[in-house]
Image: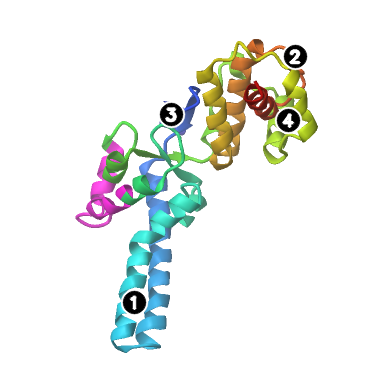
Amino acid sequence: MVIEDRITIATPEGVELQVVLAGAGSRFIACVFDIALQILLAGAAAIATLVLLGGGLGTALFAIALFACLYLYNILFEVLAAGRTPGKRLTHLRVVRAHGTPVDLPASAIRNLVRLVDLLPGAYLVGLASIVITRRNQRLGDLAAGTLVIRDSAARRVRRPKRARLPRRRASAAARSGSAPAQAGELDAAGGWDVSAVSAAELAAVRRFLERRESLDASARAELAYRLEQGLRAKVAGAPRELAPERFLEMLAQAKASR
C-alpha cells in the first residue's frame, strides 16, 4: 500500500483543496534528470564557446552560459512552465506557492538560490533530510520561498466529500468550458440575472479564479470552478441550470460588471 502525504490548502478564492505532496524519492529522481540535462547543456555551451571561440571572449561567454545552466535553468522552467522543470514534468511534479497559486519569479529565485545549501555536503543530503523531517516535505529552499512541490495528478486521486462530488456529466462540461470562452450572446443574457445577493468578496474570488485558471492543473481547475459555482448558484436568480461551472462564473462576473 502506498502512503501519500496529503494536505489541505486554502486557495485565494476561499476554496479548500486537498493535494498530495511529492516525496523525497520522486523529487530526487526529478533532480537527477534535471542535473543530467544541465550537464549536457553546459557541455554544449563549452564546445560552442571554449572550443569554437576560445580566448577571453569564449571564456566570458562560457561563464555566462554556465550560470544560466546551473541557476537560471530551474527559474525559467518553474516560472514559464507552470512550476515544472523537465525532470518534474517527467515525474509528474509541480512547484506551487504554499497557498496553491503558481510559483512566481521572486519565490523561484529564492528557492533556487538556497539550493546551494540543500546540495551540501554532497548528493543533496541536506535537502533530502529537510524533505523527510518537515511536515510539508519542504527542502530549505521551499521553506525560505514559501513553496511546495506537489503531484500534478493529486486532485484526481483525492476523494471528495459526497456533497462536493463532481458528477461525471458536469466534469465533462467543466473541461469543455475551459477551452471555449463564453459567447457574446451568452454574456448578454447574463444581464437579466439577479446577482444582488453576491457580495464583493465573493465576486473578487470569482475574478481571481478566472484570471489564474489557465495556470491551474486541469483537475484542480475543474474542482475549483465546481465548488465556487455550488457556493454561489443559490444566490443567483435567472441562471440556467445547465450551464457548466466555468461558464456560470464567467457570466456571473459579467452580470456584476454590468450593474
Q: Tell me the kind of residue under disc 2.
A: Gly
Q: Distance between the residues labelled 1 and 4?
A: 51 Å
Q: How far apart are marks 1 and 3 (CA)?
A: 43 Å
Q: In this view, does 111 lie above or below 44?
A: above
* Tag shown at residue 238: 2
Name the outermost residue toward the right: 185
Sequence-wise first label, 1 or 3 = 3
Q: Tell me the kind of residue under disc 1.
A: Phe
- Which tag is nearer the camera, tag 3 or tag 4? 4
The x, y position of residue 194, in whole percent, is: 69, 13
The residue tagged with tag 4: helix, strand or loop?
A: helix
The residue tagged with tag 3: helix, strand or loop?
A: strand
Q: Tell me the kind of residue under disc 4.
A: Ala
Q: Nearer the viewer, residue 214 or 153?
A: 214
Q: How far apart are marks 3 and 4 (CA)?
A: 27 Å
Q: In this view, does 37 lie to the left or right of 62?
A: right
Q: Give the range drawn in magenta.
A: 110-132
Q: In this view, does 45 lie to the left or right of 129?
A: right
Say which residue label 4 marks. 173
